[in-house]
Amino acid sequence: MTLSGLHLQSLNLSHFRSHKRAEIDVDSRPIAIFGPNGAGKTNLLEAVSLFSPGRGMRRASAETMTRRPEALGWKVSGILTAPDGVHEIAFQSENGNPRTVRVNDKPASQVALGRIARVLWLVPSMDRLWIEGAEGRRRFLDRMTLSFFPEHAEATLNYEKAMRDRNRLLKDQVRDPVWYRALEAQMARTGAVIHANRVAALKALAEAQENAETSFPSADLTLTQADGDMPETEEALAQALADGRPRDVMAGRTLIGPHRADLYGVFQAKGVPASDCSTGEQKALLISLILANARAIAKDFGAAPILLLDEVAAHLDAGRRAALYDEITALGAQAWMTGTGAELFEELGQRAQYIEVTEQDGQSCTKQIALSS
């Protein structure tokens, strides 16, 4: 059974994390990966996460991804079916150097990669999203935003570089405006783009939640700002940065801009802040947002994104698991999911393909399992 849509046809790993070698051939159905803790299941998901812009779902350096003790470097490659055709994509790192990206055997940028594929993920570390610091929520928001706007990552990098340079001036107590103008112009230009992209992404998510028939609770999301309102235009942000220099010099850092944003979530049906919800409700809200993000991308991009759901089934009862699997298959998404046992995926049955991961002689081994009818 081979379906259409955005999906990996194959995934090949060489000396990546715990996998000395792995060759996996799949179709576009969901993929259930099971095996004991520490066997290397999540490492497969991390490899797939590289097919989207950024540093992957663990935000790890290229050097830390190499298999030990050999430390020979690593390679991840795959054949990707996308709305615009089939692409051969490869990532490689040698001698601890940053990874390179090649698409159809030609060097490619992160932005170019983002135009070909969309990948979303939900990992256990996100479970505390609503009760920890704003930085994690900004990162979560920016990953969602990047799924709509591939250029968002470049705008964020340029903004952060200019801000670091400005902060050095502030810490050195520099007061001459000449030193600030070019940096603040770049921050204003890229900061306005970042803010506009985030607002547009939240609007798309709200529409996707409103129009969906889903078993998961909807969340009302609001973009908030520390210390007042975020200037919404390039001109207004440039003026705010200039006006704020005396205060920023005293603080030794920039106190206004998109880096001060936060994401505020409310359980829509109950009117309760997400931070005050139960652990189960917070998890359900996260799943709801990932599904809404996927629906919005499918409408905008022409195909559902690849989903990476690490240990997602472990915290859901059988009814919720069945509802999640139904929504994934209805969406037509290739979802890579991990769990400790095959029984966690019983509700999927023949709608999925199965991979068992075990550890033998210090390395991960993968075996594709065919279910009997």
Image (tube, rainbow, N blue to C red):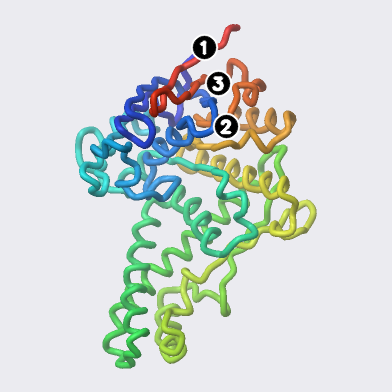
Instruction: Find residue 284 and report its image quarter.
Output: top right
- Residue 26 visible in the displayed image: yes
Disc assigned to residue 356: none
Disc assigned to residue 352: 3
Determine whether, in the image, residue 287 is placed left or right of residue 65.
right
Picture layout, residue 202 above or below residue 354: below
Who's the residue at 53% across and 26% down the image?
Answer: 35
Amino acid type for the residue under numbered disc 1: Ala
Who's the residue at 51% across and 42% down the image?
Answer: 121
Label 1: which residue?
Answer: 370
Report the Cα–Cα distance between label 2 and label 3. Answer: 14 Å
Report the Cα–Cα distance between label 1 and label 2. Answer: 23 Å
Instruction: Tell me which numbered mark, 2 or 3, is placed earlier along the sequence.
Output: 2
Label 2: which residue?
Answer: 331
Instruction: Tell me which numbered mark, 1 or 2, is placed earlier along the sequence.
Output: 2
What crowding class fits label 2: few (fewer than 14 Cα within 10 Å), some (14-19), or many (20 or more)? some
Q: Nearer the viewer, residue 187 or 317?
A: 317
Amino acid type for the residue under numbered disc 2: Leu
Who's the residue at 25% across and 42% down the image?
Answer: 93
In which quadrant will I find the C terminus? top right
Picture layout, residue 213 above or below residue 253: above
x, y percentage for residue 12? Answer: 33, 27
Who's the residue at 55% across and 43% down the image?
Answer: 122
Tags 1 and 3 in contact by the CB under 8 Å rule?
no
